[in-house]
Amino acid sequence: MHQNGSHGGTAFYTLIAVVLGVITFGEFAIVEWQFMGAGITYTWLYILSIIKFVLVVAFFMHLWGDHKMLTQIFASGMAIGAATLALMLFLFTAANMNRVEQTRFFQQLSISKTVAHEASAGHGAEAAGHGEVAEVVMPERSFAESISRPAPKNQQPVFNLVNDSVPALNLPTLKLNGVVAPTAILASTETTTETTEASTESATETSTEDHSETTTETSTEVSAEAAASFDWKELGDTTYTSVCLACHQMTGAGIPGAFPPLKDHMPELYKAEGGREYMIDVVLYGLQGAINVAGMDYNGIMPPQGHLSDEQIAAVLNHELTSWGNDALIEDFKPIMPDEVKAQRGNTLSPAQVLEHRPPSH
Amino acid sequence: MVSVAHDHAHGHEEVAHKEHRSTPIDDKKLLMWAFLASDCMFFGALIASYLVYKGRSLQGPYPTEILNIPLTTVSSFVLLMSSFLMVLALDALRHDNIPRFRLWTAGVCFFGSIFLGFQVFEFVHFVHVGLTLQRNLFGTTFFTLTGTHGLHVTIGVLWLLSFLIASYVRPMTKKDAIYLEVAGLYWHFVDIVWIVIFTIVYLVEFVG
Protein backbone atom coordinates (compact mmCIF):
# COMPACT_ATOMS: atom_id res chain seq x y z
CA MET A 1 0.00 0.00 0.00
CA HIS A 2 2.90 2.33 0.64
CA GLN A 3 4.88 1.57 -2.47
CA ASN A 4 3.56 4.93 -3.64
CA GLY A 5 5.70 6.74 -1.15
CA SER A 6 4.82 10.23 0.06
CA HIS A 7 6.87 12.83 -1.73
CA GLY A 8 8.05 14.65 1.35
CA GLY A 9 4.82 15.33 3.21
CA THR A 10 2.58 18.31 3.60
CA ALA A 11 5.18 20.94 2.75
CA PHE A 12 5.80 19.35 -0.63
CA TYR A 13 2.11 19.07 -1.48
CA THR A 14 1.57 22.66 -0.41
CA LEU A 15 4.32 23.71 -2.79
CA ILE A 16 2.63 21.82 -5.65
CA ALA A 17 -0.71 23.43 -4.75
CA VAL A 18 0.85 26.90 -4.76
CA VAL A 19 2.44 26.24 -8.15
CA LEU A 20 -0.92 25.03 -9.52
CA GLY A 21 -2.70 28.13 -8.18
CA VAL A 22 -0.06 30.49 -9.54
CA ILE A 23 -0.23 28.85 -12.97
CA THR A 24 -4.03 29.12 -13.04
CA PHE A 25 -3.99 32.85 -12.32
CA GLY A 26 -1.00 33.18 -14.66
CA GLU A 27 -3.11 31.70 -17.45
CA PHE A 28 -5.83 34.19 -16.64
CA ALA A 29 -3.31 37.05 -16.82
CA ILE A 30 -1.95 35.84 -20.16
CA VAL A 31 -5.42 35.76 -21.69
CA GLU A 32 -6.71 38.91 -20.00
CA TRP A 33 -3.87 41.22 -20.99
CA GLN A 34 -2.60 39.49 -24.16
CA PHE A 35 0.90 40.88 -23.83
CA MET A 36 2.27 38.25 -26.20
CA GLY A 37 1.47 37.45 -29.81
CA ALA A 38 -1.41 35.04 -30.45
CA GLY A 39 0.90 32.17 -31.45
CA ILE A 40 3.06 32.48 -28.35
CA THR A 41 -0.02 32.86 -26.14
CA TYR A 42 -1.52 29.63 -27.50
CA THR A 43 1.78 27.81 -26.98
CA TRP A 44 2.06 29.02 -23.39
CA LEU A 45 -1.53 28.15 -22.55
CA TYR A 46 -1.02 24.60 -23.76
CA ILE A 47 2.35 24.26 -22.03
CA LEU A 48 0.95 25.55 -18.73
CA SER A 49 -2.06 23.25 -18.82
CA ILE A 50 0.21 20.28 -19.56
CA ILE A 51 2.39 21.27 -16.58
CA LYS A 52 -0.70 21.40 -14.33
CA PHE A 53 -1.92 18.08 -15.71
CA VAL A 54 1.43 16.38 -15.10
CA LEU A 55 1.81 17.85 -11.60
CA VAL A 56 -1.58 16.55 -10.49
CA VAL A 57 -1.15 13.12 -12.08
CA ALA A 58 2.43 12.60 -10.93
CA PHE A 59 2.20 13.90 -7.37
CA PHE A 60 -1.41 14.26 -6.24
CA MET A 61 -2.31 10.94 -7.84
CA HIS A 62 1.06 9.49 -6.82
CA LEU A 63 1.65 8.01 -10.24
CA TRP A 64 5.26 9.08 -9.91
CA GLY A 65 6.95 6.24 -8.03
CA ASP A 66 3.87 4.03 -8.10
CA HIS A 67 3.77 0.74 -9.96
CA LYS A 68 4.77 1.15 -13.62
CA MET A 69 1.78 -0.82 -14.79
CA LEU A 70 -0.60 1.87 -13.57
CA THR A 71 1.21 4.44 -15.69
CA GLN A 72 0.99 2.10 -18.66
CA ILE A 73 -2.75 1.55 -18.20
CA PHE A 74 -3.47 5.24 -17.83
CA ALA A 75 -1.15 6.15 -20.70
CA SER A 76 -2.93 3.70 -23.03
CA GLY A 77 -6.28 5.24 -22.16
CA MET A 78 -4.85 8.70 -22.73
CA ALA A 79 -3.31 7.61 -26.01
CA ILE A 80 -6.58 6.20 -27.31
CA GLY A 81 -8.44 9.31 -26.17
CA ALA A 82 -5.89 11.57 -27.84
CA ALA A 83 -5.93 9.43 -30.98
CA THR A 84 -9.72 9.71 -31.14
CA LEU A 85 -9.39 13.46 -30.86
CA ALA A 86 -6.68 13.67 -33.50
CA LEU A 87 -8.54 11.36 -35.86
CA MET A 88 -11.80 13.29 -35.58
CA LEU A 89 -10.02 16.59 -36.18
CA PHE A 90 -8.28 15.06 -39.17
CA LEU A 91 -11.50 13.65 -40.63
CA PHE A 92 -13.29 16.96 -40.31
CA THR A 93 -10.33 18.82 -41.77
CA ALA A 94 -10.28 16.32 -44.62
CA ALA A 95 -13.93 17.07 -45.22
CA ASN A 96 -13.06 20.74 -45.45
CA MET A 97 -10.15 20.00 -47.75
CA ASN A 98 -12.55 18.24 -50.04
CA ARG A 99 -14.71 21.30 -50.03
CA VAL A 100 -11.78 23.47 -51.07
CA GLU A 101 -11.17 21.05 -53.87
CA GLN A 102 -14.81 21.41 -54.82
CA THR A 103 -14.53 25.16 -54.69
CA ARG A 104 -11.52 24.99 -57.01
CA PHE A 105 -13.47 22.71 -59.27
CA PHE A 106 -16.38 25.10 -59.45
CA GLN A 107 -14.10 28.07 -59.98
CA GLN A 108 -12.57 26.23 -62.90
CA LEU A 109 -16.08 25.79 -64.25
CA SER A 110 -16.82 29.48 -63.94
CA ILE A 111 -13.74 30.28 -66.02
CA SER A 112 -14.87 27.86 -68.69
CA LYS A 113 -18.29 29.47 -68.52
CA THR A 114 -16.82 32.80 -69.63
CA VAL A 115 -15.14 31.00 -72.49
CA ALA A 116 -18.45 29.34 -73.33
CA HIS A 117 -20.19 32.72 -73.39
CA GLU A 118 -17.63 34.04 -75.84
CA ALA A 119 -18.02 30.89 -77.88
CA SER A 120 -21.78 31.28 -78.14
CA ALA A 121 -21.28 34.89 -79.15
CA GLY A 122 -19.76 33.77 -82.42
CA HIS A 123 -16.44 32.02 -81.89
CA GLY A 124 -18.00 28.58 -81.85
CA ALA A 125 -15.47 26.96 -84.11
CA GLU A 126 -12.58 28.31 -82.11
CA ALA A 127 -13.91 26.96 -78.82
CA ALA A 128 -14.81 23.60 -80.32
CA GLY A 129 -11.23 23.18 -81.49
CA HIS A 130 -10.12 23.77 -77.89
CA GLY A 131 -10.49 20.23 -76.56
CA GLU A 132 -9.81 21.08 -72.93
CA VAL A 133 -12.50 23.73 -72.73
CA ALA A 134 -15.13 21.61 -74.41
CA GLU A 135 -14.49 18.91 -71.84
CA VAL A 136 -15.05 21.14 -68.80
CA VAL A 137 -18.04 22.88 -70.32
CA MET A 138 -20.03 19.65 -70.35
CA PRO A 139 -20.96 19.39 -66.66
CA GLU A 140 -21.42 23.17 -66.46
CA ARG A 141 -24.13 23.00 -69.10
CA SER A 142 -26.05 20.53 -67.01
CA PHE A 143 -26.09 22.98 -64.06
CA ALA A 144 -26.92 26.29 -65.62
CA GLU A 145 -28.56 25.37 -68.86
CA SER A 146 -30.62 22.45 -67.64
CA ILE A 147 -33.11 25.13 -66.70
CA SER A 148 -33.74 26.00 -70.30
CA ARG A 149 -32.69 22.73 -71.89
CA PRO A 150 -32.83 19.19 -70.49
CA ALA A 151 -29.36 17.76 -70.11
CA PRO A 152 -28.49 14.61 -72.04
CA LYS A 153 -28.71 11.44 -69.94
CA ASN A 154 -25.00 10.71 -69.94
CA GLN A 155 -24.25 13.96 -68.13
CA GLN A 156 -26.41 13.16 -65.14
CA PRO A 157 -23.78 11.16 -63.19
CA VAL A 158 -21.50 14.21 -63.06
CA PHE A 159 -24.39 16.27 -61.77
CA ASN A 160 -25.30 13.73 -59.09
CA LEU A 161 -21.77 13.17 -57.94
CA VAL A 162 -21.09 16.83 -57.33
CA ASN A 163 -24.45 17.67 -55.88
CA ASP A 164 -24.54 14.69 -53.51
CA SER A 165 -21.17 15.41 -52.05
CA VAL A 166 -21.92 19.00 -51.17
CA PRO A 167 -24.59 18.59 -48.48
CA ALA A 168 -23.00 15.44 -47.12
CA LEU A 169 -19.87 17.39 -46.31
CA ASN A 170 -21.38 20.67 -45.28
CA LEU A 171 -24.54 19.76 -43.46
CA PRO A 172 -22.90 18.59 -40.22
CA THR A 173 -22.17 22.28 -39.61
CA LEU A 174 -25.74 23.37 -40.09
CA LYS A 175 -28.87 23.46 -38.03
CA LEU A 176 -32.19 22.62 -39.61
CA ASN A 177 -35.27 23.82 -37.76
CA GLY A 178 -33.78 23.19 -34.34
CA VAL A 179 -32.45 19.75 -35.19
CA VAL A 180 -28.69 19.61 -35.14
CA ALA A 181 -27.55 18.35 -38.45
CA PRO A 182 -25.57 15.12 -37.96
CA THR A 183 -28.88 13.33 -37.64
CA ALA A 184 -30.02 14.95 -40.83
CA ILE A 185 -27.21 13.75 -43.06
CA LEU A 186 -29.11 10.73 -44.31
CA ALA A 187 -32.25 12.73 -44.83
CA SER A 188 -30.35 15.41 -46.71
CA THR A 189 -28.95 12.91 -49.17
CA GLU A 190 -32.51 11.92 -49.93
CA THR A 191 -33.68 15.49 -50.37
CA THR A 192 -30.78 16.18 -52.68
CA THR A 193 -31.88 13.39 -54.92
CA GLU A 194 -35.36 14.87 -54.87
CA THR A 195 -33.92 18.26 -55.69
CA THR A 196 -32.07 16.81 -58.60
CA GLU A 197 -35.21 15.20 -59.88
CA ALA A 198 -37.20 18.36 -59.30
CA SER A 199 -34.75 20.50 -61.24
CA THR A 200 -34.74 18.06 -64.11
CA GLU A 201 -38.52 18.21 -64.16
CA SER A 202 -38.60 21.96 -64.14
CA ALA A 203 -36.00 21.94 -66.86
CA THR A 204 -38.33 19.94 -69.06
CA GLU A 205 -41.18 22.30 -68.30
CA THR A 206 -39.31 25.46 -69.16
CA SER A 207 -37.86 23.96 -72.29
CA THR A 208 -41.28 24.32 -73.89
CA GLU A 209 -40.73 28.05 -73.94
CA ASP A 210 -38.37 28.13 -76.87
CA HIS A 211 -37.84 31.86 -77.04
CA SER A 212 -36.75 32.14 -73.41
CA GLU A 213 -33.13 31.63 -74.32
CA THR A 214 -33.00 34.55 -76.73
CA THR A 215 -34.53 36.85 -74.12
CA THR A 216 -31.81 35.75 -71.74
CA GLU A 217 -29.04 36.77 -74.05
CA THR A 218 -30.39 40.18 -74.92
CA SER A 219 -31.20 41.12 -71.33
CA THR A 220 -27.74 40.23 -70.07
CA GLU A 221 -26.17 42.19 -72.90
CA VAL A 222 -28.17 45.28 -72.04
CA SER A 223 -27.29 45.02 -68.37
CA ALA A 224 -23.65 44.43 -69.19
CA GLU A 225 -23.58 47.73 -71.05
CA ALA A 226 -25.36 49.60 -68.30
CA ALA A 227 -22.98 48.33 -65.68
CA ALA A 228 -19.84 48.32 -67.74
CA SER A 229 -17.90 49.79 -64.83
CA PHE A 230 -18.86 46.95 -62.47
CA ASP A 231 -17.65 43.56 -63.60
CA TRP A 232 -19.62 41.30 -61.27
CA LYS A 233 -19.88 38.05 -63.24
CA GLU A 234 -16.81 36.20 -62.06
CA LEU A 235 -16.88 37.71 -58.58
CA GLY A 236 -20.54 36.78 -58.18
CA ASP A 237 -19.88 33.24 -59.28
CA THR A 238 -16.94 32.62 -56.93
CA THR A 239 -18.74 34.31 -54.02
CA TYR A 240 -21.80 32.16 -54.57
CA THR A 241 -19.69 29.01 -54.69
CA SER A 242 -17.80 29.75 -51.48
CA VAL A 243 -20.58 31.35 -49.41
CA CYS A 244 -24.09 30.49 -50.59
CA LEU A 245 -23.79 27.16 -52.38
CA ALA A 246 -23.66 25.00 -49.24
CA CYS A 247 -27.29 25.80 -48.43
CA HIS A 248 -28.85 27.11 -51.61
CA GLN A 249 -27.16 24.46 -53.77
CA MET A 250 -25.59 24.59 -57.20
CA THR A 251 -29.00 24.52 -58.82
CA GLY A 252 -30.30 27.46 -56.75
CA ALA A 253 -33.11 25.15 -55.66
CA GLY A 254 -32.11 25.14 -51.99
CA ILE A 255 -33.18 22.17 -49.87
CA PRO A 256 -36.97 21.96 -49.59
CA GLY A 257 -38.10 22.62 -46.03
CA ALA A 258 -34.65 23.67 -44.86
CA PHE A 259 -33.17 26.27 -47.21
CA PRO A 260 -35.43 28.23 -49.56
CA PRO A 261 -34.81 28.24 -53.32
CA LEU A 262 -33.34 31.28 -55.09
CA LYS A 263 -34.36 29.99 -58.48
CA ASP A 264 -37.66 31.61 -59.59
CA HIS A 265 -37.96 33.28 -56.17
CA MET A 266 -35.34 36.01 -56.58
CA PRO A 267 -37.11 37.55 -59.61
CA GLU A 268 -40.29 37.86 -57.51
CA LEU A 269 -38.38 39.78 -54.87
CA TYR A 270 -36.60 41.84 -57.50
CA LYS A 271 -39.91 42.96 -59.01
CA ALA A 272 -41.61 43.69 -55.67
CA GLU A 273 -41.57 47.18 -54.21
CA GLY A 274 -38.56 47.57 -51.92
CA GLY A 275 -37.33 44.21 -53.14
CA ARG A 276 -33.84 45.39 -54.11
CA GLU A 277 -33.19 46.81 -50.65
CA TYR A 278 -34.71 43.75 -49.01
CA MET A 279 -32.42 41.35 -50.90
CA ILE A 280 -29.38 43.41 -49.89
CA ASP A 281 -30.57 43.45 -46.27
CA VAL A 282 -30.98 39.67 -46.24
CA VAL A 283 -27.37 39.17 -47.28
CA LEU A 284 -26.05 41.91 -45.00
CA TYR A 285 -28.03 41.15 -41.86
CA GLY A 286 -29.42 37.64 -42.37
CA LEU A 287 -33.01 36.52 -42.05
CA GLN A 288 -34.87 34.72 -39.30
CA GLY A 289 -38.47 33.58 -38.99
CA ALA A 290 -41.32 31.95 -40.83
CA ILE A 291 -41.50 32.50 -44.59
CA ASN A 292 -43.26 30.71 -47.41
CA VAL A 293 -41.54 30.21 -50.74
CA ALA A 294 -43.21 28.43 -53.64
CA GLY A 295 -45.79 26.85 -51.34
CA MET A 296 -43.20 25.49 -48.90
CA ASP A 297 -42.87 26.74 -45.31
CA TYR A 298 -39.45 27.66 -43.96
CA ASN A 299 -38.65 28.64 -40.42
CA GLY A 300 -34.91 28.78 -40.13
CA ILE A 301 -32.17 31.30 -40.04
CA MET A 302 -29.89 32.72 -42.67
CA PRO A 303 -26.67 33.93 -41.05
CA PRO A 304 -25.63 37.55 -41.73
CA GLN A 305 -22.92 37.91 -44.37
CA GLY A 306 -21.96 41.50 -43.61
CA HIS A 307 -18.28 40.57 -43.62
CA LEU A 308 -18.45 40.38 -47.41
CA SER A 309 -17.49 43.52 -49.33
CA ASP A 310 -20.08 45.75 -51.02
CA GLU A 311 -18.78 44.49 -54.37
CA GLN A 312 -19.11 40.85 -53.35
CA ILE A 313 -22.67 41.28 -52.10
CA ALA A 314 -23.78 43.19 -55.18
CA ALA A 315 -22.02 40.69 -57.44
CA VAL A 316 -23.48 37.62 -55.77
CA LEU A 317 -27.01 39.06 -55.88
CA ASN A 318 -26.60 39.82 -59.58
CA HIS A 319 -25.27 36.32 -60.07
CA GLU A 320 -28.34 34.85 -58.37
CA LEU A 321 -30.73 37.12 -60.27
CA THR A 322 -29.30 35.98 -63.59
CA SER A 323 -28.68 32.28 -62.93
CA TRP A 324 -30.89 29.20 -63.20
CA GLY A 325 -33.23 30.90 -65.65
CA ASN A 326 -33.97 33.76 -63.25
CA ASP A 327 -32.82 36.25 -65.89
CA ALA A 328 -35.62 35.06 -68.17
CA LEU A 329 -38.14 36.12 -65.54
CA ILE A 330 -36.82 39.68 -65.27
CA GLU A 331 -37.31 42.22 -68.01
CA ASP A 332 -34.79 45.00 -68.29
CA PHE A 333 -32.46 43.80 -65.54
CA LYS A 334 -30.55 46.57 -63.80
CA PRO A 335 -27.65 45.07 -61.84
CA ILE A 336 -27.38 45.88 -58.15
CA MET A 337 -24.44 48.20 -57.66
CA PRO A 338 -21.96 48.24 -54.72
CA ASP A 339 -23.17 51.75 -53.83
CA GLU A 340 -26.66 50.38 -53.16
CA VAL A 341 -25.19 47.84 -50.75
CA LYS A 342 -23.17 50.59 -49.08
CA ALA A 343 -26.36 52.61 -48.58
CA GLN A 344 -27.99 49.71 -46.70
CA ARG A 345 -25.04 49.20 -44.34
CA GLY A 346 -26.09 51.97 -41.99
CA ASN A 347 -29.34 50.26 -41.02
CA THR A 348 -27.93 47.54 -38.74
CA LEU A 349 -30.92 45.20 -38.52
CA SER A 350 -31.31 41.91 -36.74
CA PRO A 351 -32.23 38.85 -38.85
CA ALA A 352 -35.75 39.04 -37.38
CA GLN A 353 -36.09 42.73 -38.26
CA VAL A 354 -35.14 41.98 -41.85
CA LEU A 355 -38.17 39.71 -42.02
CA GLU A 356 -40.42 42.70 -41.26
CA HIS A 357 -39.16 44.37 -44.45
CA ARG A 358 -39.97 41.34 -46.56
CA PRO A 359 -42.21 42.27 -49.51
CA PRO A 360 -45.60 40.52 -49.34
CA SER A 361 -45.53 37.22 -51.21
CA HIS A 362 -47.53 36.72 -54.36
CA MET B 1 -19.05 2.71 -8.35
CA VAL B 2 -18.94 0.23 -5.47
CA SER B 3 -20.44 1.63 -2.30
CA VAL B 4 -18.16 2.25 0.64
CA ALA B 5 -20.09 -0.07 2.95
CA HIS B 6 -19.76 -2.89 0.46
CA ASP B 7 -16.04 -2.28 0.14
CA HIS B 8 -15.59 -2.37 3.86
CA ALA B 9 -17.38 -5.71 4.16
CA HIS B 10 -14.71 -7.29 2.00
CA GLY B 11 -11.85 -5.30 3.43
CA HIS B 12 -10.60 -8.00 5.76
CA GLU B 13 -10.74 -10.89 3.32
CA GLU B 14 -8.62 -8.72 1.07
CA VAL B 15 -5.52 -9.16 3.21
CA ALA B 16 -5.80 -12.96 3.14
CA HIS B 17 -5.93 -13.07 -0.66
CA LYS B 18 -3.04 -10.76 -1.20
CA GLU B 19 -0.42 -13.37 -2.13
CA HIS B 20 -2.59 -14.73 -4.97
CA ARG B 21 -2.38 -11.54 -6.99
CA SER B 22 -0.46 -11.57 -10.21
CA THR B 23 0.63 -7.98 -9.60
CA PRO B 24 1.58 -6.23 -6.38
CA ILE B 25 -1.08 -3.60 -7.12
CA ASP B 26 -4.21 -3.46 -5.03
CA ASP B 27 -7.21 -4.68 -7.03
CA LYS B 28 -9.34 -1.65 -6.27
CA LYS B 29 -6.61 0.73 -7.27
CA LEU B 30 -5.94 -1.20 -10.48
CA LEU B 31 -9.62 -1.13 -11.31
CA MET B 32 -9.81 2.60 -10.68
CA TRP B 33 -6.86 3.32 -12.95
CA ALA B 34 -8.39 1.14 -15.65
CA PHE B 35 -11.64 3.05 -15.25
CA LEU B 36 -9.80 6.37 -15.44
CA ALA B 37 -8.07 5.21 -18.62
CA SER B 38 -11.46 4.46 -20.15
CA ASP B 39 -12.78 7.79 -18.91
CA CYS B 40 -9.89 9.44 -20.78
CA MET B 41 -11.30 7.98 -24.00
CA PHE B 42 -14.77 9.15 -23.03
CA PHE B 43 -13.70 12.73 -22.42
CA GLY B 44 -11.37 12.53 -25.43
CA ALA B 45 -14.42 11.91 -27.63
CA LEU B 46 -16.42 14.71 -25.98
CA ILE B 47 -13.57 17.21 -26.31
CA ALA B 48 -13.08 16.14 -29.93
CA SER B 49 -16.78 16.76 -30.61
CA TYR B 50 -16.46 20.21 -29.08
CA LEU B 51 -13.40 21.01 -31.17
CA VAL B 52 -14.66 19.81 -34.55
CA TYR B 53 -17.85 21.89 -34.18
CA LYS B 54 -16.01 24.88 -32.77
CA GLY B 55 -16.76 28.10 -34.64
CA ARG B 56 -19.48 26.46 -36.69
CA SER B 57 -22.54 27.76 -34.91
CA LEU B 58 -24.87 29.54 -37.31
CA GLN B 59 -26.45 31.72 -34.63
CA GLY B 60 -25.46 33.13 -31.27
CA PRO B 61 -24.85 33.26 -28.43
CA TYR B 62 -21.24 32.61 -29.40
CA PRO B 63 -18.56 31.51 -26.88
CA THR B 64 -16.76 34.86 -26.68
CA GLU B 65 -20.02 36.65 -25.96
CA ILE B 66 -20.92 34.69 -22.85
CA LEU B 67 -17.99 32.73 -21.43
CA ASN B 68 -16.77 34.36 -18.24
CA ILE B 69 -13.02 33.96 -17.81
CA PRO B 70 -12.56 35.62 -14.37
CA LEU B 71 -15.37 33.52 -12.89
CA THR B 72 -14.08 30.31 -14.43
CA THR B 73 -10.52 31.06 -13.31
CA VAL B 74 -11.77 31.25 -9.73
CA SER B 75 -13.79 28.04 -10.04
CA SER B 76 -10.79 26.28 -11.63
CA PHE B 77 -8.66 27.45 -8.74
CA VAL B 78 -11.24 26.17 -6.26
CA LEU B 79 -11.25 22.74 -7.92
CA LEU B 80 -7.44 22.58 -7.90
CA MET B 81 -7.37 23.45 -4.22
CA SER B 82 -9.94 20.75 -3.52
CA SER B 83 -7.47 18.32 -5.07
CA PHE B 84 -4.84 19.62 -2.67
CA LEU B 85 -7.18 19.06 0.29
CA MET B 86 -7.84 15.56 -1.04
CA VAL B 87 -4.13 14.78 -0.76
CA LEU B 88 -4.09 16.15 2.79
CA ALA B 89 -7.18 14.10 3.72
CA LEU B 90 -5.55 10.88 2.52
CA ASP B 91 -2.32 11.77 4.27
CA ALA B 92 -4.23 12.39 7.52
CA LEU B 93 -6.06 9.06 7.30
CA ARG B 94 -2.81 7.22 6.64
CA HIS B 95 -1.49 8.70 9.86
CA ASP B 96 -4.70 7.76 11.71
CA ASN B 97 -5.42 11.43 12.27
CA ILE B 98 -9.20 11.16 12.07
CA PRO B 99 -10.12 14.77 13.03
CA ARG B 100 -7.82 16.09 10.31
CA PHE B 101 -9.12 13.50 7.86
CA ARG B 102 -12.68 14.71 8.54
CA LEU B 103 -11.68 18.35 8.23
CA TRP B 104 -9.93 17.94 4.88
CA THR B 105 -12.56 15.60 3.43
CA ALA B 106 -15.26 18.08 4.39
CA GLY B 107 -13.07 20.73 2.74
CA VAL B 108 -12.93 18.72 -0.50
CA CYS B 109 -16.72 18.31 -0.51
CA PHE B 110 -17.18 22.01 0.24
CA PHE B 111 -14.82 23.15 -2.52
CA GLY B 112 -16.34 20.65 -4.92
CA SER B 113 -19.77 22.06 -4.11
CA ILE B 114 -18.53 25.62 -4.69
CA PHE B 115 -17.30 24.52 -8.11
CA LEU B 116 -20.69 22.97 -8.84
CA GLY B 117 -22.37 26.15 -7.61
CA PHE B 118 -20.32 28.18 -10.10
CA GLN B 119 -21.33 25.77 -12.84
CA VAL B 120 -25.02 25.91 -11.98
CA PHE B 121 -24.79 29.72 -11.94
CA GLU B 122 -23.03 29.64 -15.32
CA PHE B 123 -25.55 27.26 -16.90
CA VAL B 124 -28.54 29.21 -15.61
CA HIS B 125 -27.03 32.45 -16.91
CA PHE B 126 -26.38 30.87 -20.32
CA VAL B 127 -29.93 29.61 -20.59
CA HIS B 128 -31.18 33.10 -19.67
CA VAL B 129 -29.23 34.67 -22.53
CA GLY B 130 -30.60 32.04 -24.89
CA LEU B 131 -27.94 29.34 -25.02
CA THR B 132 -29.57 25.93 -24.67
CA LEU B 133 -28.66 22.43 -25.81
CA GLN B 134 -30.73 22.93 -28.95
CA ARG B 135 -29.76 26.53 -29.71
CA ASN B 136 -26.60 25.96 -31.72
CA LEU B 137 -23.62 23.64 -32.09
CA PHE B 138 -21.76 25.53 -29.38
CA GLY B 139 -24.64 24.96 -26.94
CA THR B 140 -24.89 21.28 -27.79
CA THR B 141 -21.20 20.46 -27.50
CA PHE B 142 -20.52 22.84 -24.61
CA PHE B 143 -23.31 21.60 -22.35
CA THR B 144 -22.55 17.96 -23.18
CA LEU B 145 -18.88 18.33 -22.34
CA THR B 146 -19.06 20.54 -19.25
CA GLY B 147 -22.29 18.89 -18.08
CA THR B 148 -20.67 15.45 -18.17
CA HIS B 149 -17.76 16.85 -16.22
CA GLY B 150 -20.18 18.41 -13.72
CA LEU B 151 -21.84 15.02 -13.30
CA HIS B 152 -18.42 13.52 -12.49
CA VAL B 153 -17.85 16.21 -9.88
CA THR B 154 -21.27 15.55 -8.35
CA ILE B 155 -20.56 11.83 -8.08
CA GLY B 156 -17.18 12.64 -6.54
CA VAL B 157 -18.69 14.94 -3.92
CA LEU B 158 -21.30 12.32 -2.96
CA TRP B 159 -18.68 9.59 -2.82
CA LEU B 160 -16.38 11.60 -0.54
CA LEU B 161 -19.35 12.67 1.56
CA SER B 162 -20.05 8.99 2.18
CA PHE B 163 -16.55 8.66 3.73
CA LEU B 164 -17.30 11.55 6.03
CA ILE B 165 -20.57 9.98 7.14
CA ALA B 166 -18.98 6.53 7.45
CA SER B 167 -16.33 7.91 9.79
CA TYR B 168 -19.07 8.90 12.25
CA VAL B 169 -21.00 5.64 11.86
CA ARG B 170 -18.08 3.30 12.58
CA PRO B 171 -14.45 3.73 13.57
CA MET B 172 -12.11 4.45 10.70
CA THR B 173 -8.41 3.63 10.70
CA LYS B 174 -5.48 3.81 8.35
CA LYS B 175 -6.49 0.37 7.05
CA ASP B 176 -9.31 2.13 5.26
CA ALA B 177 -6.91 4.48 3.51
CA ILE B 178 -6.95 2.41 0.32
CA TYR B 179 -10.65 3.17 -0.19
CA LEU B 180 -10.07 6.86 0.25
CA GLU B 181 -7.07 6.63 -2.05
CA VAL B 182 -9.22 5.15 -4.83
CA ALA B 183 -11.89 7.84 -4.35
CA GLY B 184 -9.07 10.39 -4.34
CA LEU B 185 -7.75 9.10 -7.68
CA TYR B 186 -11.21 9.68 -9.13
CA TRP B 187 -11.35 13.16 -7.65
CA HIS B 188 -7.94 14.14 -9.02
CA PHE B 189 -8.92 12.81 -12.41
CA VAL B 190 -11.99 15.03 -12.44
CA ASP B 191 -9.61 17.86 -11.66
CA ILE B 192 -7.24 17.14 -14.56
CA VAL B 193 -10.14 16.86 -16.97
CA TRP B 194 -11.13 20.36 -15.90
CA ILE B 195 -7.56 21.58 -16.45
CA VAL B 196 -7.93 20.51 -20.08
CA ILE B 197 -11.46 21.90 -20.48
CA PHE B 198 -10.49 25.22 -18.89
CA THR B 199 -7.74 25.70 -21.45
CA ILE B 200 -9.43 24.32 -24.56
CA VAL B 201 -12.96 25.62 -24.05
CA TYR B 202 -12.43 28.82 -22.09
CA LEU B 203 -8.95 30.33 -22.33
CA VAL B 204 -8.05 29.60 -25.95
CA GLU B 205 -11.32 31.15 -27.11
CA PHE B 206 -10.17 34.60 -26.04
CA VAL B 207 -6.71 34.60 -27.62
CA GLY B 208 -6.08 36.91 -30.56
Image (tube, coloured by chain):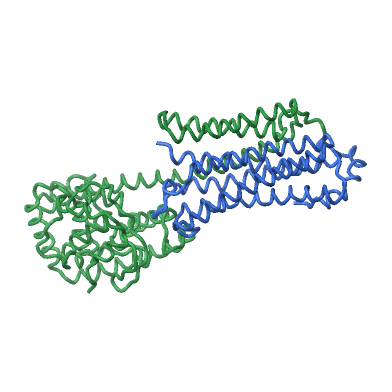
Chain colours: A green, B blue
Relative image position of residue B139 (x, y in whole percent): 48, 54
Q: Residue at x 34, y 71 (%)?
A: A297
Relative image position of residue A39 (x, y in whole percent): 42, 31
Q: Is residue A324 left or right of residue A67?
A: left
Using the image as rendered, state which of residue A96 and residue A122 is in the foreground: A96
Using the image as rendered, state which of residue B77 and residue A138 is in the foreground: B77
Q: Residue at x 27, y 50 (%)?
A: A306
From what the image shows, is residue A73 above or below residue B60? above
Relative image position of residue A215 (x, y in whole percent): 11, 64
Q: Quadrant of the N terminus of chain A?
A: top right
Q: Is residue B141 left or right of residue B151?
A: left
Residue B46 in view in this figure: yes
Q: Is residue B11 left or right of residue B2?
A: right
Relative image position of residue A177 (x, y in whole percent): 41, 64
Using the image as rendered, state which of residue B71 and residue A253 is in the foreground: B71
Using the image as rendered, state which of residue B48 and residue B113 is in the foreground: B113
Q: Quadrant of the C terminus of chain A?
A: bottom left
From what the image shows, is residue A292 above or below residue A24? below
In the rendered image, the residue lying farthest to the top is A8
In the rendered image, the residue lying farthest to the right is B16
Q: Residue at x 85, y 44 (%)?
A: B172
From what the image shows, is residue B118 above or below residue A159? above
Residue A154 in view in this figure: no
How many badges with numbers are in the image?
0
Q: Is residue A123 left or right of residue A315?
A: left
